[in-house]
Amino acid sequence: MKRLLVLALLLTAAAGDIHSGYDDASPETRAMQDDDSANPGFLWVREGEAQWSGKACAACHGDARVSMRGVAARYPAYDAALNRPITLDQRIAQCRTERQHAEPFTPESDAALGLSAYIGLQSRGMPLQVSTDGPMRPFYETGRTLFNTRMGQLNLSCAQCHDERAGMKLAGAVIPQGHPNGYPEYRLEWQTMGSLTRRIRNCMVGVRAEPFPPDSAEMTALALFLAARAAGLKIETPAVRP
Amino acid sequence: MVRVLLNVPRQVRRNEPFDVKLLISHPMESGQRRDAVGLAIPRDIINLLVVTYGNEEVLRMDLFPAIAANPFLAFSMTAVASGTLSITFTDDHGVTQSETATVEVV
């Protein structure tokens, strides 16, 4: 009984302490994110804004500040036609190829990241709130399983670092809780903008695992689980991280 | 075409310092790195930045390697009359680009 109580307390503590990678970043990095004129992510945002109004986005969706408000907060979302969840980036790609009949974006290109950042920005400050009910449930469970599965030559799971050792150090850097609330984000290490997919690939290569392909079911399920795990955290797109 | 974000207050007070902030999308390739086959990647940095206000030069800056990609530059200045702030920079490829903003002195 006592052991159960301790476990319950631990779980409450863990659940209560959800915080953004922003809180783990240095004051200098935070200052960069706080000032839109110093945040390099806005170079991409402006690119995305130009695309939005220049291409057919605005023709259907009108003013992004109105139509895209809150959209990033509910992705990955269920796509009834595909019978599976899709990420916001996949949704943008779908719109681009199927409705605009345009060339698909090159992954991680300035154009793709820019549009994603511009759309994400419209939800800045809003809490992440993805659905995990109904048809989303099995995908969420898959994501949870992947998060807790040891992988790679180092035989580590996401959870071992980002749940169990969050707040501790990996080399000189604080291990963040690994929340997806700022993507696409500007990473100082990359000296450029990158998507959540790139970040996950980065982690997987780090544990010497074969990364999930960008648009694979595994990657989407993991993105869904991460978004659900971060429920309530405010969107910071475009975030700045070390 | 390099993307530039130039941030200047639209209205400033006469003789009172104000901040000019500048973000430039540029790789700032240091010249020290090598590519996948071991060939040196040529240096490509912004090496000169000139700021003029009206017809007067207010800042001239030589830049060197060891500046991160997408540099952020900020400086303070004062104005006595309304005018156009113009920022011109040149990189190692000889590409020159300008960005302007109007400042109103109230």
Image: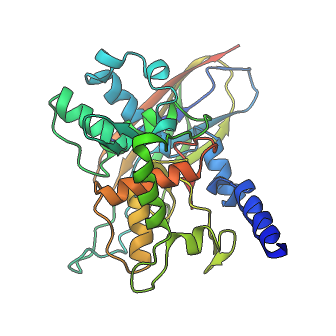
Nearer to the camera, A93 or B93:
A93
Residue A166 is drawn in which quadrant? Answer: bottom right
Residue B78 visible? The answer is yes
The color scheme shown is rainbow
**Compared to B56, does A4 lie above or below?**
below
Residue B45 visible? The answer is no
Nearer to the camera, B37 or A183:
A183
| Residue A61 position within the rendered picture, expressed as x and y whole percent measured from the top left | 35, 19
**Outermost residue to the front:** A1
**Compared to A59, does A238 lie above or below?**
below
For the point 46% across and 73% down, the residue is: A149
**Compared to A189, does A109 lie above or below?**
above
In this rendering, would A78 be left or right of A158?
left
| Residue B65 position within the rendered picture, expressed as x and y whole percent measured from the top left | 45, 65
For the point 30% across and 46% down, the residue is: B95
For the point 51% across and 54% down, the residue is: A226
For the point 70% across and 57% down, the residue is: A15
Q: Tell me the quadrant of the picture where the N terminus of chain A can be found.
A: bottom right
